[in-house]
Image: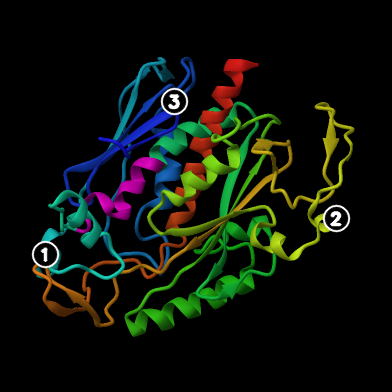
Amino acid sequence: MPGNTFGKFFKITTWGESHGKGVGVVIDGCPPRMPLDETIIQPMMDRRKPGSSSASTKRKEPDKAMIMSGVFEGMTTGTPIMIMMHNKDAKSDAYKPYADLFRPGHGDITYQGKYGIRDWRGGGRASARETAARVAAGAVAKALLDREGVQVSAYTIELGRVRAEKRDSEAIIQNQFCCPDMAAAKAMEQRIMAVKKEGDSLGGIVEILASGVPRGLGDPVFDKLDADLAKALMSIGAVKGVEIGAGFEASAKLGSENNDPIVPSQGPRGGGNFPTNNAGGILAGTSNGDDIVMRVVVKPIPSVLVEQKTIDSKGNPATISTKGRHDISAIPRINVVCEAMVCLTLADHLLRQKAIS
């Protein structure tokens, strides 16, 4: 049905539920003769799987990606690629007490209103478990981008109002929150532990950087690159806001301040360079060759122990305290999901551009 497919030339369809037999993705449009096996996909899967930080759920899913089709002798064949991951540690009984209650902040009440039925086991299709399939597809897109010299990375710049003041790329892999500021990462750990004791959750901000993106990606008028990137990132359940380049700070600037000066380029691509990057690497919906810089606002995890008001399926007032195995924050596990969605969008637009150039 509509809503489960993303992309035009590099197209993915995800499937599966949080407590079903598994989750997976079908990728259509991946070029042939590209090296691909599970060892290329698994590193991104490992960054998303539970247990990566003190903010993570206790659910233990190995998330071993299995390529079911579209690859022969270690090379893509140009036919649809299917990747799946079995659900190994789903404990549906933990959700039975809430089967007749609408959990605040979740999609329970909207799924019930839309379909007249819902899978109450961990949220079903609305669960963040679905993002495992996106990451698997994103790993394939990343392999395609690597061949073109495009690199995408995501890192935490704010968690629980603790803000990173530095951008040290080496620090990102040295702490559990993937934060480019080690001092901020230590403060984030303290904040997480304090909120965890209170039975509550935290949100934050993730920044995504795409470098080496060629000029010319993005189509007028409704398929602008920034529009598609915003949609890709907003399609992640916990994301409630997206900004590119200067973002909301642009509203406080003069036009002369916000415009990026253009100077002659000495590089092999010619054209111009931009000493500043308020545009975030995109002008008129088209990549300008500069780094693409995006930030997303991540809401707090809605499953909390703090008692909240709600209603049951018959509309009667009730209270709920959501017990079970939940993340304290979607960060840092959501970082690789953001990275995957950006890779998918860039791969799609790269193939579109190759078709016309």
Can you see residue 237? yes
Q: Position of residue 312 (x, y in %)?
A: 12, 71
Q: What's the amino acid at mark 2?
A: Ser
Residue drawn at the location 15% of the way across and 79% of the way down: 318
Q: Which residues are magenta?
A: 122-134
Give the side of residue 288 with respect to residue 147, left or right.
right
N-terminal-most mark, 1 or 3: 3
Element type at mark 2: helix
Q: Is 124 one of the magenta-colored residues?
A: yes
Dot 1 corresponds to which residue?
99
Q: What's the amino acid at mark 3?
A: Leu
Give the side of residue 176 with respect to residue 119, left or right.
right
Element type at mark 3: loop
Q: In what quadrant of the picture does the N terminus appear? A: top left
How did the renderer colour the structure?
Answer: rainbow
Dot 2 corresponds to which residue?
256
**Between 127 and 6, the one nearer to me in the picture:** 6
Kindly identify which numbered label has been placed on residue 36.
Answer: 3
Crowding at label 1, few (<14), some or many (≥20) Cα neighbours within 10 Å? some
Query: Distance of mark 1 from mark 3, alpha carbons?
Result: 41 Å
